[in-house]
Amino acid sequence: MPTFRAPRGTRDLLPPERAVFGRLEAVARDLSRRYGYREMETPLFEQAAVFERGIGEMTDVIEKELFRLVPRSEEGEVWALRPEATAGIVRGYVQHGMHTWPQPVKVSLIGPMFRYDRPQAGRYRQFWQWDVEAIGDPGPAIDAELIELGARFYREAGLDDVLLLLNSIGDTECRPAYVAELAAYFREHAVQLPDLERRRLETNPLRLLDSKDPSLAALQARAPRIVDRLCPACAEHFGAVRSHLDTLGIAYRLEPALVRGLDYYTRTAFEYYREGAEGQQQALGGGGRYDGLVQLLGGQPTPGIGFALGLDRVALNLQSSGLAEGQRPPLAVIVGAEPAATAERLKLATALRAEGLPVRADLSRRKLGRQLEGAARDGAHFAVIVAEGSENGALQLKDLQAGTQRPLAAVDLARELRRAESSHRHG
Ligand code: HAM
């Protein structure tokens, strides 16, 4: 047992897995650019009140999962690690007067989030999200644009079987009466409720709808549904979101029990799952509209919508389906007939790297045969053999894939490798 380990619920991303994350980030950044979202950063920690007020004191994320930092007396502020990005981004929108920018303000953020959750497969205490927000547009068209963007991410990342679940959870007009009706319904059946759910009934009755406790299944199935009780404005909005999605050819499943775990949502709510894996903790991403949040955090009334996609879960799904790309092999490995002439090999590799080529120099003092074995094990396309005393002279270019070898002048090497690289697209 090593003396120190990464904290429970966290993990090191070793190079092969980090490479998968890097590819997902590249897909996300490219989509952000195409869809007009500009990246921003917020601090990894904020005043705890930003999250408490934004996300809601009675949510699991705040009540149980918030990583609070020990208060530093000289500042007199209580901080917490960010459990998600939306509250911080909206705090930034208000702080920097972004309502004076052209609306909507479309921003994205890729980074780690922290939740003190019970760790299990796909659920970590530090995890990564790609978060996208469009602030200042009431929809409905932008709702569809954003939902389609999320769906496209999974396809471009390599997951073709991602399902979209959709609901509308109303607004301040229609939801309070619905929540009261829901609470009354569950209260009538209070004896059947497990302890935890009976407590939730008093604090956050909506959560009973997406509780996965099997003893609740029958009650949930008969519970009143918010979609049947939307006020006319919310119903019209939802209908328009759906028809925009239809126009874009985006398939979805209506999910009346989808209420999301954060309090700031209004109207449109959605989640992405892999087909057949719609259980708890399996969501690959989710989001929705939050038309009250800007005001809640001190700004003018401003609508907004966004999503966050969990990169860890996407990476896990790619890996378990054998879709994650392995490490990129070097294009060439520089080996030498003179084992001790490491400076020569290093110099040649340095010159090629300066030209932008991905090469490795064998800096061991192994015999040539062993160096060549190493190059083959790396999956390199070429081994460049520096012959004894070949200072500026002839090299041997060995094509490890074709099994051929030919002499080559050092001055021609970079051009030759570049040509092979562009015709072959290594990695
Ligand atoms: P969320 O549903 O709490 O929404 O999280 C979004 C996604 O982050 C989840 O679907 C999941 O893939 C991933 N995720 C959440 N918790 C964990 C965890 N403990 N371990 C691994 N992955 C996790 C939000 O965070 C909202 N801020 C989304 C949003 C943006 N709504 C509007 N704008």
Image: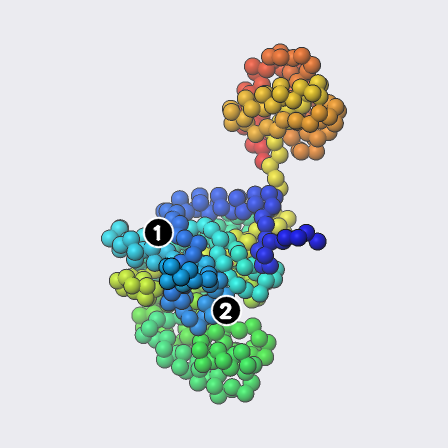
Residue found 53% across the figure and 63% down from its top: 116
Q: Is residue 273 visible?
A: no
- Residue 386 picture quarter: top right
Specify the quadrant of the image occupied by residue 15.
Answer: top right
Res. 119 mark: none
- The residue pinned by badge 1 equals 106
Q: Nearer the viewer, mark 2 or mark 1?
A: 2
- Towards the viewer: 402 or 46: 46
- Give the mark nearest the N terminus, 2 or 1: 2
Q: Is 132 located above or below residue 362 in the figure?
A: below
Residue identified by numbered label 2: 64
Q: Residues within 10 Å of mark 1 (few under 14, many from 20)?
A: many
Q: Is residue 96 above or below residue 258?
A: above
Check whether the beta carbons of the residues at disc 2 and disc 1 lie within 8 A of each other: no
Q: CA distance from mark 2 to mark 1?
A: 31 Å
User: Does the beta carbon of the residue at mark 1 sit less than 8 Å from ligand 1?
Assistant: no
Q: Residues within 10 Å of mark 2 (few under 14, many from 20)?
A: some
From this viewpoint, which residue is outermost toward the front? 74
Residue at 60% x, 53% y: name it.
6
Identify which residue is drawn at 64% across, 48% down.
Answer: 322
Q: Name the residue nearer the viewer: 243 or 124.
A: 124
Location of residue 98 in the rendering, given as x and y in whole percent from the top left corner: 28, 53
Residue 184: where, in percent of width, then height?
Answer: 44, 85
Which of 60/23 is in front? 60
Q: Residue furthest left?
A: 100
> Is residue 33 found left or right of 12 in the rendered image?
left
Identify which amino acid the numbered label 2 is placed on: Lys
Residue 277, placed above or below residue 28: below
- SS category of the residue bearing label 2: loop
